[in-house]
Structures are given as structure tokens and as C-alpha cells.
Image (cartoon, helix red, strand yellow):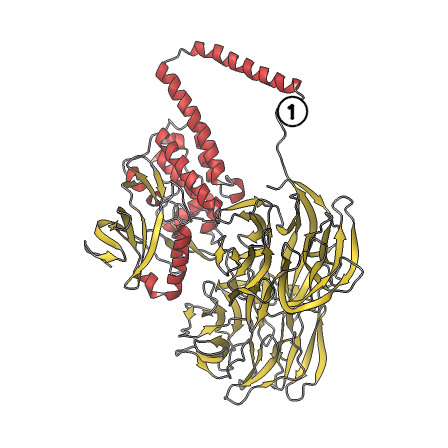
Amino acid sequence: MALASGMKLGPYEVSGTVGAGGMGEVYRARDPRLQRDVAVKVLPASFSADAQRLRRFEQEARAAASLNHPNILAVHDFGLHDGTPYIVSELLEGETLRSRLQTGALPVRKAVDYSLQITRGLGAAHDKGFIHRDLKPENIFITKDGRVKILDFGLAKLTQPAGDGVEAMQTVESAEGSIVGTVGYMSPEQVRGRTADARSDIFAFGAVLYEMLSGQRAFKGDSAADTITAILTKEPPELTQSNGQVPPALDRIVRHCLEKSPEERFQSARDVAFDLETISSVSSTAAGQVTVATPRRKLWPRVIAGIAAVLALLAIGVLAGRKTVPPPSVPLYRQLTFRRGTIMNGRFAPDGQIVYAARWDGNPAEVFTASTETRGSASTGIHGADVQSISRSGELLLVLNRHVVFAFARPGTLARSPRSGFAPRPILDDVQDADWGPDGSNIAVTRYVDRRFRLEYPIGKVLYETNGWISFPRVSPKGDMVAFLDHPVFGDDGGSVAVVDLAGHKRTLSHTYPSTQALSWAKDGELWFSASINGTAADLFGTTLKGQERTIASVPGGLRLLDISNDGRVAVAQGHVRRSDVVLGPGQTGERDLAVADWTLGTDLTPDGKTILLEEEAEGNTNGVYSVYLRNTDGSPPIRLGDGSAIGISPDRNWVLSGTTASPTEFVLLPTGSGEPRHLPRGPVAAFPVPGHYWLPDSRHIVFSGVEPGHKPRIYVQDIDGGLPRAVGPEGIAGAVIVSPDGKSTTVKDEEHTWLVPLDGAPARQLAGVGRDEIVINWSPDSRSVFVFNNLEIPAKVFRVNTSDGKRELVKQFAPADPAGVGSVGPIQVTPDLRFYSYGFDRYLTDMYAVAGLK
């Protein structure tokens, strides 16, 4: 969209053109409110053509505006003009680094100066969780006064879904997946389609620094394939071949940035900046020596004097008992538990002990107390409970009898209890988590009511409500606000840290992490929380009430925060988490583990037992998002079909239905053979892409739960070859859908009941013989019975239930041979004839530590 001078975009008046590129056209404009000139970037029409992408862009643009650093382009505003998005940023005068490099290599002093500014900007952005992923000379601007500005931070990520194949970003297909970046500056992990992190930006920076010093690209071939090969297998030519002025120390920094393995590179941009500052200081000193033309022989007296001064200081330190040079402060981890199993939750009691819930050695949950001095644990005699909070008087809040609504959303009954000697007293149903207020009388709870999660403080006063779900409410020490983890997708543990005051005003304090797991107030008013950047292994982070985030601790296996004591000690659970999926298929004599990586779910099994549909969610994944795989049950390698959540295989096996990664309310058809993915139009209907068997026998229609404005949730049918979803079921009945083999009806599981819904419009009825916590997993071949199980029981027992009279019979039992650390069994897939099956289970093996010295 070309803009003429004098045209207005919101309050901004266009005065001229600045330039254009892959991410859009840039104009000079005037902001009359603040009387300043600004730059307005109008983005390509492809952004406005996709409503979901437009919403996501707005969120990312606002997040990018939080990057306040002198070496990052400042974003002022975001808006829409005739449906086309634009970004308002500071107006820069100068040129890009690419333009500067057209005349050849830069002087070493200039290259080091620019590099220092780049790494400082990268370090600030990485601290806030932003990864550029497309750092290159075109995205680095040099102002007229010599200041470096990194451009498009936070926008590089936005180009990925549409795969804009323009100069700014190029999408290349690799053997392992779709990769995004600019060929020549991508790290080896990006080339392989794996997750990009801060170390990927460091690799790109190394390529940029190499080019500044040599005037040549570090990796360049006759074709994109040749360049990729060079990135993966070759080292760039020695810098001394093109620039004899490059000092060896600077050459070592470049090589360290360009290591093929991320583990062997600099681990942070701040580390790179530190080494560059050292070189800069040495260069400045050397320059000073040349300027005064000091004779070489006169340096020796100064060196000797300097050595003598250092020795004198060391002697003083020794005579002072070395107290003048204190040893570095490092956290002290003290292990408190030594049994095999899972720590669920734990809290510091007023006497300094830790009260925690755990499942040891495959046994049900039990509440224990642990001493931080003797490393011993004692049972309180409370069984089947999860610890939530301890009042100043020592009274416990517990959650009993949790049931699964969906995935991590597992409310139960809130109860109060002394530490031991008395049975817990139930006080409130449908509670996910709870916390005492500082007065020891009021309680904050997150509850599941009328199919929505809400935060109440005190009980009965609703402060926040969501279509997603809420966990870990934590009342502030003053009792004036409640912090919590806000999960936007129902049942998924991805989310952010938020606070709400007693008037219901909510603020989000962190960016959204793929997994958020625990939360607690620290002594200085900071909020500490466990979250993972990718996968299940969580690090410990902190955020202030102003939203300033930082990393506190990171260890192998991850740290899940339990509680913080008044004296600053921290209780954590550390260990390893893995979800496996085992299968018994044709020709097998025993079960085979078909997990793709470390968090695999089997979501569908073909009737002949030969092919399973898998969803991989965690760190072993190829690109950091959920992925859909097909795999033969004979153990042959999995085939990655694309991003998203895995739902079901069509009866003709030509398609896999999946939920999109970006929007959980939309469906995508992934071809099992050649072809391109197809997005199904949803119109006003928001789908519920929960696991189930959605396909009708004709392989042309799907049945699913959804909701549209003005209606309650219900069942819809959609033709995959065209047309919008069509409502077929009664309003108010929605949930997991399992279509019968004859295509005449479907079961629907909501949080209370299992329904039988005819697809011809006949009345729905509750299915007798199926319990509240039982899940339908398939039908019998004659469409007269269903198979159900309860995934909170170990072993998981599968029953055949007659749909006419509700009669039940036990037909299968599933459990891993080693039950230690296994929290649940499921999903379970069985073929209609019960000959073949698959089942998943998660195993948490954790130990509890008390940590002193974390800051």
C-alpha cells in the first residue's frame, strides 16, 4: 500500500518515504501530539489477510515495544489503517551496516565498537526472552553519531507462519523440518530446523563480525544448498588472509561464536561483550602507547612497579587472613528426600520444616514433613491429598480427590487440616489450587465453575475469570493483591505470571512461556516462578511488579519451585520428566516404546494396529512447538507431518486432522502422502480440538465440539471439501468426541457426564454405566458398546460398556512394570477388536532440596 505525502495513519501524518524491504515499506511521519518525527512501517497485505496472524502480530509488536535499550530500535505504537497493520518507531538517520560494508571491511576499532553495541542490545533482549533469529547486516543500523540500532527485534518471529520468501526472511526445507532465517547467517541448529535460542543469535553475530573484519561473508556458496553445507561442515577462511590487522584474541572470539555446536559457543551475549571490552581496553591502551611514542625500554620499569604493587596487595590480603577477598557466593543445595517417586507440592511451615505431598515407590499420594537439618521425612498420616498452603498458625490447606477436566486442569475438594492427628475437613468443591491470606482466615482459590476457571479472594469474591485456566494463586504479603499463573489454553500448562488487585484489575508481568509450573512471593516483593523456554525442564525465573524478568537458576533436569521461607531459603523439586507411549501391534510379542522424544502422546491407532498417530511436545522436538508424527508400530522411524496437536487419522489414511499451533480453535488437514496442508474454514465457530475420533467413516466429514457467538457449546459436522461447520447436537453438550464405526452417533464427554448424541438430530441421552472420571476411547466393531477407562487409576482398567443398558465388563488393564514416579496412565488407544493397543504414561522422578543463597 503506497502512501502519499500528507496522508494520515491514525494521528500520524506522512511526510515522505524512507525505504522498503521484505517486511514492508517505511515512511517518515509527524506525531503532532509529541511534536516529533517518527518512522511508520506499513506491513505487507499478507498480515491483514490472516486474522489470526494479525492478532498474533499485535501481541508480538506490543511485546517488542517493551525492549527499551539504546541499541535496539524503539517501538512507539501499533495501529491499523484500512485493515493494514503498521508499526511506529523512532526515526533513524544514517545507514544500515550492509550499506557500510559495500566499501569493504571496517577498521578493527570500528568493528569492535559496533560489535560491543550489538552484543549489549542482544543481551538486553535475551534477558527478556526475545530471540531475533534473523540477525544480519540489513537488520543493523548505524546512526550518524555512530550508535548501533538492532532493527526488527521481535518481528523476525512473525514472518515464520506465512513463510514470506522475500529478502528479509527465507524459508528453506531441510530433512528435519521447516527452517526460517537468512541463508548465510543461520546457525547450524536453525539450518536443521531445530529450536533457535540465544546461542543461535550469537552464531549470527559471529558471522556479522567476521564480515565486518574481512569484508567477506563467513559462509557463502554458489547456491543456498552450498551455503547450508558450508554452515554445517566448513570453517570460514582465516581472518588473517584478508585482514592482517585482526588481533589473535579477536579472531578467537569470532571462532568461538561460530562453533557448530551451541554448547561450545559463548552461552550469552553478555559473555561476548565482556571479551570484546577486554580487547577494546587493550586496543585503547596500545593506541595510547603509540600516540606518546614511549620507547620500549621505558615500559619495563612501569611493569616491574606494577608487579610490585600487585604483590604488595596480595601480601596484605594474606596478612589479613584473606578476609579482604571473600570467596564467591554460590547457592548451597541440600538434598532432603532420597526415595523414588514424585514430589507434588511442598510448603515451609512456621517452624521451618517443609510439609510436602509425594507419591513414593508407586504408592498413592501421602503428606510428609521434612527437616532441613536432619534430612529425614515423617508421614503425617494424611493420604490422597495435595499440599496447597500453610497458615501462620500451622493449619494446612489441602486438595483432595482431584479429577481430570482436561490435561493439567484437575480440580478437587479443598480441605483444612492440622499438621497431623486429624482428618482433613472438606470446605469447597471444584478447587484447582489455593493459598492462605496473610491474616490466616481468608483464602484465595482458583475454581472451575460453569465450565470456566475463576480466581476468588476471599472465597466467593471473583477477581478474574477466563476461558483458559488458572493455577497457583499466591496472596501478597500485604494481602492487597493475588499473583497467579494465567494459562490461555484450557488444560495446557503454557502461560504467564499475572497479578490482580482486590478491585479486579489484572496485570501480566511476564511473557508467555511454553510451560509454567509454580509461583511464590520472594522477600523483596519479586515473584519467583518455574517455567521452561522449551519442553518440560523448568528454570527458576523472577519478575518484578514492573515486569522486569530475570533468570535466577538453571540446572540439569530443571527446577520446580515449591516455596520460599521467610529467611530466604528456597524449597525446590529437581529431577527428570518423561512421557512415553508404548504399543503392541501386529507380529509383536511384547510392548514397544514408540516415543519420539521426551513428551510423546499417542492420540490415534489405525484399526489394524499398524500405524499410530503421535504428538511430541517437549525439548526433544525439532522446532520448539508441538509436532505431529505418523509412525508404524513395527518401530520404523517416525514421519513428521507438521506443527500442531495430533487429533486423528482419516479412515482412508489420506489425512491427519490436527489443531494449529498458533490458534487452538482451528483445524488443519495434514496429508499423509504428497500434498499441502489445508486449513478448514471455521466461520464464527471456535473448535475444541481435544483428543478424540472425529472422522466419519466416509473420510469426508469430521464431527467436533465447538461454540459460536450467541450459543452454548455443542456438536458440529463439517465437510472437509468445503463449507462451514453445521450444528447437529443440542446446545450445552460438548467435549471429547468419539464417533461410532457406523457413523450414526458419537459419544461426548463433558466434565460431569458422558452423552450419546445421534447425528441425525434425535435427542441426546446420558450414557449409563460410565463414571464421571471415565473417558471413552473407542467403540466395538458393531457400534453397540464403548470402551472406557479412568486415567487417574494405576493400573488403568478398560471396561466394555453396553450403550443400551450400561452393563460393564473388565477387558484390559494397562500399567508400566515399574510404577515409581508414574502419575497417570493415558491416553489409551485400543483397536475395535481389542487385539492391539497403545498407552502412554508420564514418569516424574524428583528429589526435594532446600537451597540457601539463591538471589
**Where, by quadrant of the figure, is residue 752 drawn?**
bottom right
Residue 741 relative to residue 848: left or right: left
State whether residue 317 is above or below residue 623: above
Q: Position of residue 57 (x, y in %)?
A: 39, 58
List x then y, in percent, for residue 260. 49, 43
Residue under label 1: 323
Where residue 44 appears, x then y in whole percent? 30, 58
Which quadrant of the figure has residue 105?
Answer: top left
Name the one closer to the observer, 148 or 711: 711
What residue is drawn where x is 76% and y is 57%? 419
Q: Secondary structure at mark 1?
A: loop
Going 47% across and 50% down the picture, which residue do you hit? 196
Question: On the picture, is 469 further left or further right than 23?
Answer: right
Neighbour class for label 1 at 10 Å: few (<14), some, many (≥20)?
few
Q: Quick check: can you spot residue 584?
A: no
Vertical position of residue 545 compared to residue 613: above or below:
above
95 relative to 592 in the view: left or right: left
Given residues 97 and 830, the one toward you in this image is 97
Quadrant occupied by the C terminus: top right
Where is residue 136? Give x, y as percent: 37, 44
333 to 380, vertically: above or below: above
Residue lying farthest to the left in this orientation: 5
Residue extending furthest right? 421
